[in-house]
Amino acid sequence: MIRQPIVTVCGHVDHGKTSILDKIRGSSVAAGEAGGITQKISFTLFPAENIKKGCWLLDKHNIALKIPGFLFIDTPGHAAFTNLRKRGGSLADLAILVIDINEGIKPQTSEVLSILKANKTPFIIALNKIDNLSGWRKQSEDLKESIESQAVHTSQDFQEKLLTFQASLHSYSFNSDLYFNVKDFTKKICLVPVSARTGEGIPELLMMLCGVSQKFLTERLSLAEKAKGLVLEVKQEKTTNCIEAILYDGKLRVNDEIVIATFQEPLKVKIRSLEQIKPLSSQFQAVKESTAATGLRVQLSEHVDILPGMPFQIFKNNMQEIAKEFKKDLSESIKTDSEGIIVKADSLGSLEALLTLLKQENIRILKASIGKINKQDIQAAKSNAEINPLNAVVIGFNTTLDKEADESRSEVKIIDNEVVYKLIEDLKKWQEEKRKEIEKAKLMKLTSVFKLQILPQYVFHNAKPAIFGVKVLGGRLKPEIDMITKDREKIGRVKKIQHEQASIEEASEGMEVAISVPGITFDRQLKNIEFLYSDMGESQFREFKKNKELLSQSEMRVLQELAEIKRKEKVTWGV
């Protein structure tokens, strides 16, 4: 006996994943979703009789349907179907990667391609929105005939976008071709142009899914005796838990006992009630028994702490065997380094996929777990700061901070997002800014860069020391830095800086402060001087010039003026 293939529909936000599924199942889910974006994972049971109705091409090409149907999984773009994982890779037997032919590969498409490749999941690409191509008209019920019958300018537009997309896909090491040109599905990715609006290409997409499933997945689809599944969502109730899950192997019955994985000891619970997703519906119906592959809502006999994304299997007096399997599964999923950042995610699948993508970016991970960001995560990140300030960060995918963590978050950078690629992008941006900040701090230990305008109306003490007002026109003013005039005359060092009657360690651009300079008399040395500059040697100047990307525009401007002053005496100064 073979089960339904589990087909994940994935891709970039707004490329039409749910709309394509709507066309297949004859519903209109997409219109009712917030902002037109799928908010949670949903599943659709699509029986064999409906495949036959929706795909007249099976009869045309004499393809006998052997599979009992499909279990389609529609995932939010931000999830990148990462919750759908099991030991050894993806829970999905097949994937439909939906791509807007007019936009091509977008960041989340890239993310999905990386995960498909890492999990070795076979996939078909639906090139959606062909109806948006200039001048496109539906010419025939047969997609191949329709493509070949388009007007010349439309055909050119289609070919240009197709070739551009194929070139982009090739950069991910995937060769591809239009579905009717693919002879070996193990060597080329099958491209099916579709329109979720007009329905063009939907029969061809279903035919390709049936063909690939029956040719390559028969062994994988053989139903095992042992029931296995994956928790997608946990709904906490007062005395019990209700979980939404996918049963991907075997059979489950009411009153069966199942074991659910945790990061500690596995949990054994009894099934109080069982509901199965109805065909072509988002509604559930009560059943006594359910056979894979299907979507379930399961009420458990007691309240236990369950994490989304965790695997479960039926209990047959084999707790030791199950515990060993789960332990191996979790240890293989979450591999960390001796140093690195702290990572949190909403589910095991999300975490596993996030770790895969972080490692592709050569980002090291010290600690990774599921749930809210907590005080222990903050403490771990603080300890990181002492070893490597670039690791003083906690990143959270689709998760939040608990109250204690929020109260102790100072000194630690928290980066959270519901989109994986944005999360990694934000992390890399922060680390780069932090690196520049650290490099600049090292650079500024050599000396400081500043230009001051003397405020002659504010002379508080004429000599021993001279205390007078200045305005910082550029850079940052710090004590113990030698100063010179435009005429290269050495003036001495700033001893103290005062702002609003309080001593400060530095003054930034635009501030007006009082400074004290020992060893000079204001009336004799500064009365006719308008500007003062920080002084530095040639080697220090070259070091600043070499690291100019770390400097602000005003600091660069001050350096340029200083070089002009110095070169009045020595033309090659600082070159």
Image (cartoon, helix red, strand yellow):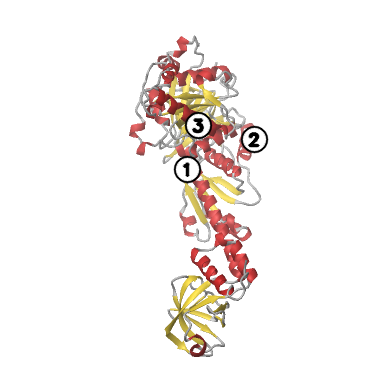
Of marks 2 and 1, the one in the foreground: 1
> Is disc 2 in contact with disc 1, using a CB cutoff of under 8 Å?
no
Percent coordinates x, y for residue 63 in the rendering: 50, 11
**Of label 2 and label 1, which has the lower sequence position?**
2
267 or 261, nearer to the observer: 261
Circle 3 residue: 165
Secondary structure beneath label 1: loop
Disc 1 versus disc 3: distance between alpha carbons? Answer: 23 Å
**Residue depth check, mark 1 versus mark 3: number of the one nearer the observer:** 3
- Can residue 328 be seen from the camera position used here? yes
In what element is the residue under mark 2?
A: helix
Q: Quadrant of residue 223?
A: top right
Q: Is residue 457 above or below residue 249?
A: below
Query: Mark 2 sits on what residue?
Result: 324
Task: Give the crowd class for mark 1: few <14, some 14-19, many >=20 residues within 10 Å.
Answer: many
Determine whether, in the image, residue 280 is placed left or right of residue 330.
Answer: left
Q: Say whether residue 221 is left or right of residue 100.
A: right
The residue under the point 54% across, 90% down is 464
In this rendered view, identify the residue nearer to me: 416 or 571. 571
From the image, which quarter does the N terminus lie in? top right
According to the picture, the residue beneath numbered tag 1 turns out to be: 419
